[in-house]
Amino acid sequence: MPLADDVLADLLRRGERARLRGSDRAIQTIFTDTGSAYWQQNYEERQHCHMHFTAAERGGAVRLNWSRQGGEDRPLEKVRLLDVDKLASFLGTATVSESVQTARTILNPWLAAYPRVAELLDAWASLKSPRGLGTESARDFSDALRVLEALKQGDGDDQIVRVVSRHLFQNTKRIEALSRHIDLLTAESLSAPARQQEEVFSALGLLKEPQPFLVAGTGTLILHSSQQCPIAWPFIGVSNRHVADYSGTPAWVLSIENLTTFHLASQHPDAPTGLILYTGGMPSPSWCKAYASILDALPESIPVYHWGDIDQGGFRIAAHIKSQSIGRHGFYPWLMDAERLDGGAYSEATEATHANMARHARDAGWESLSRQMLPRTVEQEGIAIHLPTEGI
């Protein structure tokens, strides 16, 4: 960008921030320092720069202060901003207020039903761009909201992401391109950490391909139409949406976040005494519904555990399961306290990560673990297989 454009654009940004704060301080750029970029220009470049600044001054956007010495070739000492709107017009760009108004017009159909839209507009009006997404992303957010609305109007079944994308946009990959926007619209807050695309989509029931409901242990799944499906060794898989009920007397129930750990746990000698379920990472709405129907068939005296990664995502998944599937039963962490694990590799968590882990643990109902949690992250696959009958 030529120096004159760069300077004027900087004045515009500073002027908009000052207007937001209600400040009437002079906004200006000074060139008296001989080491500045202005003085690094050759004669022709400086003359071109002067012409551009002079045009902005004629438009009423800025005021120029020239050196008293130098005759017709006298240097420019200062450019002072006079009018934000006129400078924006001169530069051929919209002011923040104009950009926000344009975005508001685009997103207006979603304002009443989605409070996050109003939060976005407020952030943009305050010169903030959550996750680097500014007013220029308004149409992308509108498309992301179309996705959320389509899922809301659905019957609760999991959807194949590229099929939905083709139906809504005639583009099989459009929804995947909107993952950051969908994440921000469904996150706890605008300042929440970014999540992986798979976690965001799975929580909404958007899957890359159909996922079976994997179960190991004891008992029988009751499918719709009263079809009985005994749980064979080492595990079985059925469709989430066909699980209607459960029959059996497990000593405990354990949900497991990761597939490798589920496979190993399903073949553990103590697996037949309980009921083990694979969540598929962040469980989808249909998985949560199926799990809730199983728990509804069990006495509340049977303990229910969850075993996931010791990190933000693992505790966020636990909190999600707690809110979506757990009703009468006690819900407990299994091998998710780094302090009680023997050896094994771990990573130190940042202060922000540790705070989020503790908050999600609290949301899962694990207050004691939340208070005493070490600032460490541990992947589930690095923990030796133990099941609840063995204690911890």
Image: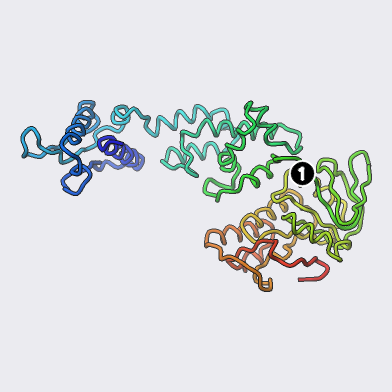
State the residue in front, 377 or 191.
377
How many numbered marks are there? 1
Q: Residue 41 at what x, y percent from top left?
A: 20, 40
Q: Residue 69: horizontal and vertical position, in percent?
A: 6, 39
290 vs 175, left or right, is: right
Quadrant of res 38: top left
* In-image side of 352 versus 306 (left or right): left
Residue 2 relative to residue 315: left or right? left
Residue depicted at x 61% and y 56%? 312
| Camera-side residue of 355 and 49 | 49
Is the C terminus in the top left, top right, bottom left or bottom right quadrant? bottom right
Is 137 displayed left or right of 392 in the figure? left
**Secondary structure of the residue carrying numbered label 1:** loop
Residue shown at 32%/27% (left/top)?
89
Q: Which residue is tagged 1?
A: 211
Q: Amino acid at mark 1?
A: Gln
